[in-house]
C-alpha cells in the first residue's frame, strides 16, 4: 500500500481521524491529515488525557513534591470533612486512583454533581469510599479522577496546566497550554462533541485545575512526543524529564478482571496492549491514541474528532500503520 492508498483507506474506513504521526527508531516516518485539519491543529484527546496526568504525578514524585503513590489521599486534604459513617475513604491511596481501583459510591460518572459544584475536587471526594471497603476491583472512572489534580495542586502549589507547561510540555517543545472553563453545561457539551480544531487548551474547573481524566487538547505531533518520551524511558533530546523508574512502574501490567476492556491490562492510567512485547497506549474516546511498541521502537499517535464508541483504533494501527512504516 502506498501513501495515497493509505490516505484514501483512512478517509473511507476511519472517517473521524484528523491526524496521524508515526515515528520509528526516533525518526518521523509518517505524517498526514484529514477533515481539513492542519498538522498543528488540536483535538480533544478525551481519556488519553489520563496518561499525561500519570506523567505529571511521576514528575512530582521525582521531585519529592509527592512522597509516594502509597500516600493516603486524605493526607492532602486535611480540611476536607468526611461524611458521617464513611470509613473507607481514610485508606484510599494515590495508587488506587492511578490503577482505577479506588472505590466509589456511584454507578458511572457523576458528571452533573461534580461539574455543577464550586469545588470539583471535594465534590469528587464525596463519592470516594463506600461500605464495600477496599475491594481492589477495577473501576474505571473519569470525572472523579479530578482528585488527582487536587493532589497535584496541594503538593506543588501549581495549577495543572502550569505544572505541565513547565515540567513536561516546554521540555518536549509542546506549545503552552491555557485553561478553558465552560460557563454552562451546553458549553461543556460542545467542547466535548465539537468537530472543529481546538486551541492548545486544557479543560479546567472553576479554580483553574485541569481535568485529569479528559479535557486536554493536543495535535498528533505533540501526542507523539509524549510517546517518544515514554519509549525512551523518560528522556527527550538527551534530557531526563521523568525518571526511567517511573516509566517502568507506570507501564507495568496489572490484570483487569473484566471482559469489557478487550482483554487489555492496565498500568498507571495507561492501557497495556501486549505484556510480552511491552506494547502500551494512551486511549481516549473517539479513537484518540498514543501507541507505543517498545520492541519495534514504534510510536504512533492518532487524533480524532468526536465520534462515540470507536473501539478499533489500536487494531487499525496494528493492521495498517505498523506494516506501512
Image: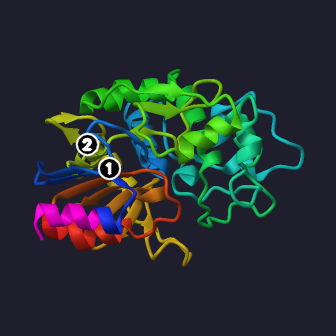
Question: Please, is residue 315 above or below residue 173 in the view?
Answer: below
Pointer 1 or 2: first along the chain: 2
Judged left or right of residue 87, residue 99 is: left
47, 258: nearer the viewer: 47
- Secondary element at image label 1: helix
Question: Please, is residue 306 above or below residue 165 in the view?
Answer: below
Q: Residue beneath label 2, please?
A: 221
85, 325: nearer the viewer: 325
Disc 1 to disc 2, C-alpha distance: 20 Å
Identify the residue at image location x=55%, y=48%: 193
- Secondary element at image label 2: helix
- Residue 269 belongs to the span the image colors magenta: no
Magenta region: 1-10
Could you say which disc has been placed on residue 159 in the image?
A: none
Question: Please, is residue 272 above or below residue 205 in the view?
Answer: below
Crowding at label 1, few (<14), some or many (≥20) Cα neighbours within 10 Å?
many
Residue 252 pos. (x, y %): 37, 61
Question: Please, is residue 31 above or below residue 273 in the view?
Answer: above
User: Magenta segment, principal secondary structure?
Assistant: helix
Residue 171 pos. (x, y %): 26, 29
Quarter holding residue 124: top right
Disc 1 versus disc 2: nearer the observer: 2
Could you say which disc has been placed on residue 247 in the image?
A: 1
Q: Are marks 1 and 2 in contact (CB under 8 Å)?
A: no
Crowding at label 2, few (<14), some or many (≥20) Cα neighbours within 10 Å?
many
User: If the image is split into quadrants, where does the C terminus sit?
Assistant: bottom left
Q: Residue furthest right?
A: 84
Amino acid at each position: 500500500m502506498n501513501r495515497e492508498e493509505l490516505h484514501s483507506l483512512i478517509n473511507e474506513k476511519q472517517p473521524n481521524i484528523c491526524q496521524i504521526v508515526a515515528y520509528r527508531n526516533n525518526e518521523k516516518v509518517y505524517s498526514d491529515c484529514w477533515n481539513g485539519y492542519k498538522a498543528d491543529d488540536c483535538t480533544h484527546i478525551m481519556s488519553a488525557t489520563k496518561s499525561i496526568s500519570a506523567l505529571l504525578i511521576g514528575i512530582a514524585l521525582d521531585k519529592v513534591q509527592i512522597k509516594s503513590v502509597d500516600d493516603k489521599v486524605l493526607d492532602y486534604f486535611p480540611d476536607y470533612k468526611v461524611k458521617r459513617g464513611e470509613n473507607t475513604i481514610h485508606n484510599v491511596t494515590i495508587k488506587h486512583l492511578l490503577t482505577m481501583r479506588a472505590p466509589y459510591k456511584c454507578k458511572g460518572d457523576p458528571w452533573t454533581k461534580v461539574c455543577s459544584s464550586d469545588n470539583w475536587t471535594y465534590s469528587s471526594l464525596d463519592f470516594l469510599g463506600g461500605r464495600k471497603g477496599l475491594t481492589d476491583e477495577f473501576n474505571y472512572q473519569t470525572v472523579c479522577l479530578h482528585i488527582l489534580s487536587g493532589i497535584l495542586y496541594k503538593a506543588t502549589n501549581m495549577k495543572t496546566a502550569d505544572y505541565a507547561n513547565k515540567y513536561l510540555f516546554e521540555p518536549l517543545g509542546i506549545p503552552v497550554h491555557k485553561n478553558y472553563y465552560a460557563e454552562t453545561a451546553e458549553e461543556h457539551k460542545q467542547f466535548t462533541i465539537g468537530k472543529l480544531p481546538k486551541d492548545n487548551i486544557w479543560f479546567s474547573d472553576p479554580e483553574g485545575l485541569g481535568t485529569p481524566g479528559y479535557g486536554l487538547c493536543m495535535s498528533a505531533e505533540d501526542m507523539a512526543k509524549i510517546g517518544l518520551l515514554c519509549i525512551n524511558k523518560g528522556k527527550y533530546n538527551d534530557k531526563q524529564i521523568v525518571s526511567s523508574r517511573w516509566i517502568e512502574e507506570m507501564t507495568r501490567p496489572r490484570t483487569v478482571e473484566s471482559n469489557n476492556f478487550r482483554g487489555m491490562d492496565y498500568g498507571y492510567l495507561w492501557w497495556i496492549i501486549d505484556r510480552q512485547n511491552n506494547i502500551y497506549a494512551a486511549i481516549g474516546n473517539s479513537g484518540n491514541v498514543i501507541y507505543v511498541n517498545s520492541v519495534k521502537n514504534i510510536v504512533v499517535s492518532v487524533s480524532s474528532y468526536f465520534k462515540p464508541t470507536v473501539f478499533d483504533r489500536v487494531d487499525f494501527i496494528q493492521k495498517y500503520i505498523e506494516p506501512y512504516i
